[in-house]
């Protein structure tokens, strides 16, 4: 898959403002982004940035656990935000 399309979509979601509706949409679509990330269709940096931004919007604080690898941080933020990893088709 061409990486431009999925990476563009996740970037649009990342920078959407933090209204409750947008946060709900981010949570709803995250499993699809995660699936694309695991299939290497989305860059890990874009997933990390999406999660970092969502973490700040939901928890009203910065994520600051940088002692782990990017992949580990992604998994830790997913757990902290209690996001689903599998899409509910």
Image (cartoon, rainbow, N blue to C red):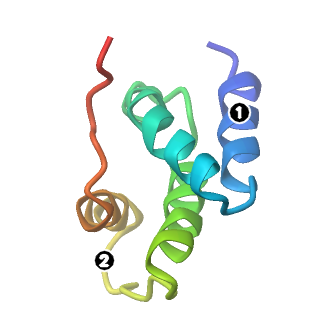
1 vs 2, front mark: 1
Q: Nearer the viewer, residue 18 or 6?
A: 18
Q: Which dot marks residue 68?
A: 2
Frontmost residue, 80 versus 74: 80
Mark 1 and mark 2 lie on one chain; the one further toward the N terminus is 1
Query: Which residue is painted at 31% across and 57% down in the image?
Result: 78
Sort mark 1 into few (<14), some (14-19) or many (20+) by Cα contacts within 10 Å. Answer: few
Residue 35 or 44: which is nearer the viewer?
A: 35
Q: Residue at x 37, y 32 (%)?
A: 38
Residue 9 got which mark?
A: 1
Q: Position of residue 32 (x, y in %)?
A: 44, 27
Query: Which x, y percent locates residue 60?
Result: 51, 84
Please state if 64 lies on the left or on the right of 88 as rendered.
Answer: right
Looking at the image, which residue sits at the far front? 20
Q: Is residue 14 left or right of residue 69?
A: right
Task: Find the distance from the CA under tag 1 to the CA under tag 2.
Answer: 26 Å
- Residue drawn 71% across the image and 33% down it: 9
Quadrant in the rendering for residue 12: top right
Marks counted in the figure total 2
Give the SS element for disc 2: loop
Q: Specify the quadrant that holds the N terminus.
A: top right
């Amino acid at each position: 898959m061409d990486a431009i399309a999925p990476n563009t979509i996740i970037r649009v979601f990342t920078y959407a403002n933090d209204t409750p509706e947008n946060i709900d949409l981010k949570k709803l679509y995250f499993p699809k982004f995660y699936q694309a990330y695991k299939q290497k269709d989305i860059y890990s940096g874009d997933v990390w940035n999406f999660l970092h931004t969502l973490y700040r919007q939901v928890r009203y604080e910065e994520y600051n656990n940088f002692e782990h690898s990017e992949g580990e941080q992604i998994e830790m933020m997913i757990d902290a935000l209690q996001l689903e990893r599998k899409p509910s088709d």
